[in-house]
Amino acid sequence: MIKYIHVLIVDDDSAVRTPLAALIRSLGESYICWEAEDGLTARDLLRQQSFDFAFVDINLPAMNGLELLKEIKEDHRDMLVVIITGQPSYDVVLEALRQGASEFLSKPFTRAELGIALEKLKREKALREENLVLFRQAQEKKILEHLTRQLDKRVQEQHLLQTFHQDLWDLKQTEDLYPLILKMAMELTQAEHASFMLFDKEDNTLKLVVDSGDNGGHQIIWQAASQVIRHQTPIFTQGKIQGQRHDESIRLGISLPVIIRGEIFGVLNILGNSNKGFDDEDLALLDLLAERCALTVENLALYESMTSNLYDTLRALVNTLEARDPYSSQHSERVTQLSVAFAATLDLPQADLDCLQFAGALHDIGKVGIPDAILLKPGKLNPQEIEIIRTHPQIGERIVTPLGLLPAERTIILCHHERWDGMGYPCGLTGEQIPLLSRILSLADTFDALTSNRPYRRRWQLSDALQEIQNCAGTQFDPHLAAKFVHWLQEEPLLPDWMGSRSAPPLLLPDLNPGPALCGLNK
């Protein structure tokens, strides 16, 4: 006999609600779907019908999804709710989990993702029903204590996932992972000391990567970690209880392996004191932490490898582009160095410096789509040629869009020829509409163009180039940034040597009066 599962779908968009109901029914004949266009309609249905699951959109008229979730959890505690959102954020997800949501789905989602969510709901429902039966039968203290421990474990696991999920997600390099793992381990177990060691399989040695807290048990930890490597299993370190008989001891520490693809990657250690012991529940939480650590290391390694390969590929394309034009040789590299160095003086966050480092090297990649007859033309460009070369930021942005660059990195490539007065291209942005990083790169780009040889003129002297940038502050450049940029270059002692070390190809034309170069086109 089929046991039907009643599912309530609440979404104000029928183009989402009705196909979702059909998709759920296609996943099994046991699903019966009900639809509601808003929270008030859903409330009426809940009074008439008992539901097992609910899929609730976060943005609803009259009553939003979180408000409906709260009512459901107050009046229908056994009902499992999935929050649906088209714009997921950490705060929304965290609030939904706090109010009792079992899962969340980000629009658009696939049939496979929906199937996984439903299977998770069915498992959770089965577990709840099983626990309910056990609770009703739990007249004996042992069963009740078991359920209590399981509940505490789940609460701590949820705390772990909710508190540190975003931090783990934001990590961009493996070195930042280990201190975070130690912080998590110490908070979960109230340990006084934690450390992480990497295992070198070739040398069969352990290397201490990061150490936190009181390190009074340093020798004990090394001995335990060695045992972990030897036996490939967690180890409890023992210690004596103060004021008790000599033969009584407690588990003062835990060392456990971090395993990636069946091989030991490292060892996570915690240590308490003689007043704090650890049990199997602590070990279970640390084991969960070690699994998350291993997964994050794999993801970071994949991310770093993909980023490196992507950067190498695109940089090779830029090198090919610059090889076409000896007068722009190493231009992108110099612009990147200038941009990052100047941005560092502004105390911008490391994420911004990383964006400039990556996008700066690719800012002119769109010039691969410009014909050589225009790109390498020794004289001035005619109006039609100017319009063609002004398409290179858009070409560059289209080239990198499918490759997974961050939005800030794509914006640098698209907007590095915008002007403060709105006379730039391709979007005609004005003032602070132009992203800060694009304004920074524009200064470096123009400075390098002025101080580099061109087929139609010699490079400018440093003082002339800085004066021209000052003259164009408030028209071409952000006046505040331009003043800081000029001051920084005047104070930078290594700049003249760096400029003088650049290769200077022979000029095709005699030295001319440079004139108001910034009013023309900087190819």
Image (cartoon, grey):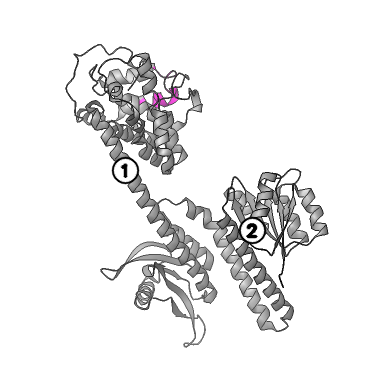
Q: Is residue 476 magenta?
A: yes
Q: Quadrant of residue 438?
A: top left
Sooner in the amino-acid sequence: mark 2 or mark 1: 2
Residue drawn at x 39%, y 67% is 261
- The residue to which callout 1 is attached is 313
The span picked out in magenta is 472-485
The image position of residue 266, as x and y in percent, is 37, 67
Q: Is residue 480 magenta?
A: yes
The image position of residue 200, as x and y in percent, is 30, 66
Element marked by disc 1: helix
Give the residue type that dot 1 points to. Answer: Thr
Q: Quadrant of the C terminus?
A: top left
Q: Can residue 487 be seen? A: no
Of residues 479 and 263, the one nearer the viewer is: 263
* Figure disc tally: 2
Residue drawn at x 26%, y 30% is 495
